[in-house]
Structure formats: structure tokens, C-alpha cells
Image (cartoon, rainbow, N blue to C red):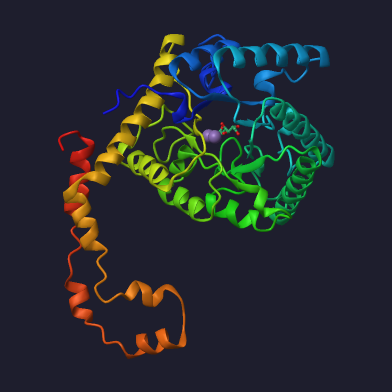
Amino acid sequence: MSDFTPKKEDHFTFGLWTVGNVGRDPFGEPVRPPLPPIEAVKKLSELGAYGVNFHDNDLVPIDASPAERDRIVREFRKALDDHGMKVPMATTNLFSDPAFKDGAFTSNDPRVRAYAVQKTMRAMDLGAEFGAEVYVFWGGREGTETDAAKDPRDAIKRYRECLNFLAEYDIAQGYNYRFAIEPKPNEPRGDIYLPTVGSALGFIATLDRPEKFGLNPEFAHDTMAGLNFVHAVGQALDAGKLFHIDLNGQKPGRYDQDYRFGAEDLKTNFFLVKLLEDSGYTGMRHFDAHAYRTEDIEGVWDFARGCMRTYLILKEKARQFNADPEIQGLLQELNADPDNLGNLLRAYSRENADRLSAMAFDRAALGRRGYAYERLDQLTIELLMGIR
Ligand code: GCO
Ligand code: MN
Ligand code: MN
């Protein structure tokens, strides 16, 4: 059994904005000083992370001169090399500046939309300089408070045009990014377009180059809305669209809490880790979360350690679940198919349809069957509580 110490091959990443979160909220001022990106790289590497991700302005201030930009890039590059850290993902800050108060790609002001695309092109250049392979689009400000402001069809059309434009830019520059759309139902806008994994998947199918686009689902975003995140990730995996994932902790029905991974709803997080591990997902395990506002910098590192350690513990629990004879026995019984009916349904054929039409089903017997899910769930709970 592992000692749950994170290693580079676990592919854990953190955003610069996560460990760098200063604890500002709508009611209170920062409680921690800004964390220089180079410090974040050094400490996260010591803790066993694989890399860091950033928004353009987490690294380069929005008003930096070209010379300042180049100096920052040089120094950051050196820190990454010195500490063996990667930048697997990059993204654009299209939400902090007041210019984006009506959205970026969906703003009613065409100048804002054009500026947003220009800013993203530059941020893509920056990410590519560091070898980022995934590019995230989180549309935090792409929404409304009042639908008097814009027709949702116009918003979706503008969104599509901007993403199509950026996909062509990517190809022309030879970057070969995998674009990952991150759905969220609300916050900071009253309502955000593309609120769920399903709506993002539907939208991707309407893009000029759907193969370049996938998902970056986030635990907190589905959980806020009371949805089942494990099902959403399963659907993204099934569609071959899980390009990246944002892991964190969240209670349903609250504001966006972004707690330490696994801090809330251990059972759901267990099934999430099990799904990722069983599926052979090879992408990053990215933590998009931050330390409680009560914490000083030591608490921030406790937070970062905790995210990775909980993931590894749940991964070990998933291994135990898959090796547990009683649990596996129940699962085998549940899926037993003595009449080979699964095969019958796999594909339509005249012959299969005739066979099916002629079949007699004992409906009463089907209704009497017990599925033993109580036993299965209790075994899972006991496994998670450490007594199996
Ligand atoms: C949020 C989002 C963001 C994005 C980030 C990277 O709720 O604030 O999750 O943290 O993930 O902008 O795209
Ligand atoms: Mn979020
Ligand atoms: Mn996120």
C-alpha cells in the first residue's frame, strides 16, 4: 500500500490562482499576501505536483510592457526548469477587467468581443511558449442578469464565431491545442450560457472543428446545481471529450465554494476517482480550489497537500473496491445474462427483431427481483470508512 505521497507521475496540477488565492470575497478584503508565481512553482514541486496552469494575467499583469512580459516569461521558464515543473494547461482571464462586465465572446459590444479574441490569441501564444497542450474556455462572464439584454441565440452564435476563429488561429500558428470548454450554471453572472456538460457537448457539435473541442468539467459547478458530477464526467468520457478536469469540494445549493478536493461528499468523490482511474483517463488531475479564508500560507500548503493525498487515498479505495470478492461477486450477479440478451440488443437486425418479438417475459418475476443495492452500498460505505 502506498504512503500516499504524490509523485510527478500522478499528474497533479494546480492553477497559479488556486494556491495564490488571497482570500478576497464579496464581503471581505484579502487575508493573505499575493504569492509570487515562482514561489508557487517551487513549493508545489516540493509537494509532488506535476505542474501549474495559469490565466495570462496570473503570470503577466494586464498592463505589462513587452519588455516586462519577456522578463517575466524568462524568469518563470527558469523556475519551471529548476524545479522540473510543467505547464499542461493555459487559459485567458476574460472576467476580471471591467471591460468584460457584459461578457467577452458574447458581449453586446463588438469591440469587447474583438478585444476578447485578441487577448485570447495572445494568451494562447503565451501558453504555447510554455508547452501547454490544453486550452481552457471558462465562460464566467458569458451570461446575463436579464434576458431583456440579448437573445440567447445571438449569444450562442457569437460564442461559436469566436471559438471557430480561435480554432483557425490555433491551426495557423501550429499550436495544436486541445480546447476544453468549462461549463458553469451561474456565478459571477446571474445565469451563464453553456451551463452543463450536456449543453457544452451539444454546442461542440455545432462548431466548425468539433474534433478540437472537449470538456473541462468541474466538481463544484455541477454540485452547486444539484447535479450528479460522476454522471456528467461519465458522459464526457463516453463522448471521448474529457480533455481536462477541475477537482475541488462543494456543498450543493451554495455559492461557489472551491474547497479542498474531497472536503465534501466523500462517497461521490470516491466514485469520481474510481471512474477516472477505471476509464484509463490520461489527462491531468487539476485542482481548481483554494484554502479556507481562515488560513495563512502554511494552511495553503496543508490545503494543497490535502487535495493530492485525498485523491491518492480514494484511488487506493477504488483499487480495494475492484479487488473485493464480495463486492465484485454482487456486481457479477447483477450483470448476469444467461440468455445472452445483451448481444441481442447490441445491433438491430431483422433476425434479432424477430427473436425479440417472439420472446415471452415473466413481468411478475422481473418485478419481484431484489437488486441488493442496499448491501452493495453498505459494503461501499464500510470500505470507505476503513473497516473492510
Ligand atoms: C470559477 C472557474 C475558474 C476557471 C478558471 C480556469 O468558478 O471561477 O472554475 O476557476 O476554472 O478560470 O479556466
Ligand atoms: Mn469554479
Ligand atoms: Mn474551474
Residue 141 location, x and y as percent? 65, 37
Q: Is residue 359 rendered to the left or right of residue 190? A: left
- Identify the residue at the far right of this view: 111
Is 337 placed above or below 199 here?
Answer: below
- Comparing 376 with 182, the one in front is 376
Residue 164 location, x and y as percent? 76, 49
Taking the image as four quarters, which one is ligand 1 found in?
top right
Q: Is residue 132 rendered to the left or right of residue 251? A: right
Residue at 78 percent of width and 37 percent of height: 117
Residue 175 location, x and y as percent? 73, 37
- Comparing 23 with 45, the one in front is 45
Counting labels gives: 0
- Quadrant where the C terminus is found in the figure: top left
- Comparing 57 with 179, the one in front is 179
- Quadrant where the N terminus is found in the figure: top left
Q: For residue 86, what is the image quadrant?
A: top right
Residue at 21 percent of width and 73 percent of height: 367
Q: Is residue 250 rendered to the left or right of residue 110? A: left
Residue at 32 percent of width and 35 percent of height: 314
